[in-house]
Image: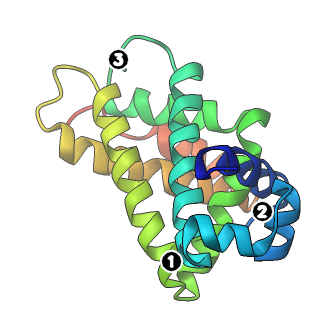
Amino acid sequence: MSRETLLPLLAAHVMAHGLADASLRPLARAAGTSDRMLIYHFGNKDALVAALLDYLVARFADALDSAFPQARSASRRACAETVYAVTGQPAFAPFRRVWWDIVAGCSAGNAAYLAAAGGMMEVLLEWVVDHLPASDPDPAAGARAVLTAIEGAQALRAVGRGDIAEAGLAALEGRPA
């Protein structure tokens, strides 16, 4: 087995069970290998987690691309509302679960999660820039505003207050901040 063949197997396990209790032995079992082979391929658990999270963010971006309308959004608000709606679909539930595990790990100071989450946010910022209106006067700032709105809305939905999230997204201005 190679890193490239292990990552989809590890990702499937994490998507089904989350990251909170991921340790080498259950991950190895899920991939049909040993914990020693995981260390051989990835170096250590932190490197394995970083590679796994990089793999998952790429799959998340691919899933967004598949579910997102082909045209650019009409406004920042429309982009945020569409991403919120798309990521609320059942197919995205495993991604949401893993994301909240990462957020919890970051809150606890887990350096591997903090590094991976930072990289994930950079990928997502680039994705949002590519989906904002071509006429957006400041796509980088727009992407930051949209990502902030989406993350806040996702947190509200996660705690059962999707009504606040939807009202907040609906109140966004479609012009630069």
- Residue placed under numbered mark 2 in the picture: 18
Residue under the point 60% across and 52% down? 3
Q: Residue 32's quadrant in the figure? A: bottom right
Label 2, label 1: how many angstroms apart (C-alpha)? 16 Å
Residue under the point 18% across and 28% down? 136
Viewer-side label of 1, 3: 1
Q: Front-most of 161 and 30?
A: 30
Query: Mark 2 near mark 1, Cβ–Cβ under 8 Å?
Result: no
Query: Mark 1 near mark 3, Cβ–Cβ under 8 Å?
Result: no
Label 3, label 2: how many angstroms apart (C-alpha)? 32 Å
- Residue 121, position as x, y percentages in the image: 40, 55
Q: Residue furthest left?
A: 137
- Residue placed under numbered mark 3 in the picture: 72
Question: Could you tell me the amino acid type at mark 3?
Answer: Arg
- Please determine whether, in this image, residue 32 is positioned above or below residue 104: above
Decide: few, some or many residues near mark 2? Use Cα within 10 Å; few <14, some 14-19, many ≥20.
many
Q: Secondary structure at mark 3?
A: loop
Residue under the point 51% across and 41% down? 58
- Residue 34, position as x, y percentages in the image: 81, 68
- Residue 61, position as x, y percentages in the image: 50, 36
Question: Could you tell me the amino acid type at mark 1?
Answer: Ala
Q: Is residue 78 left or right of residue 46?
A: left
- Residue placed under numbered mark 1 in the picture: 112
Q: Residue furthest top?
A: 71
Viewer-side label of 3, 2: 2
Among the two numbered marks 2 and 1 on one chain, the one whose residue lies closer to the N terminus: 2
- Residue 103, position as x, y percentages in the image: 58, 70
Question: Could you tell me the amino acid type at mark 2?
Answer: Gly
Among the two numbered marks 3 and 2 on one chain, the one whose residue lies closer to the N terminus: 2
Among the two numbered marks 1 and 3 on one chain, the one whose residue lies closer to the N terminus: 3
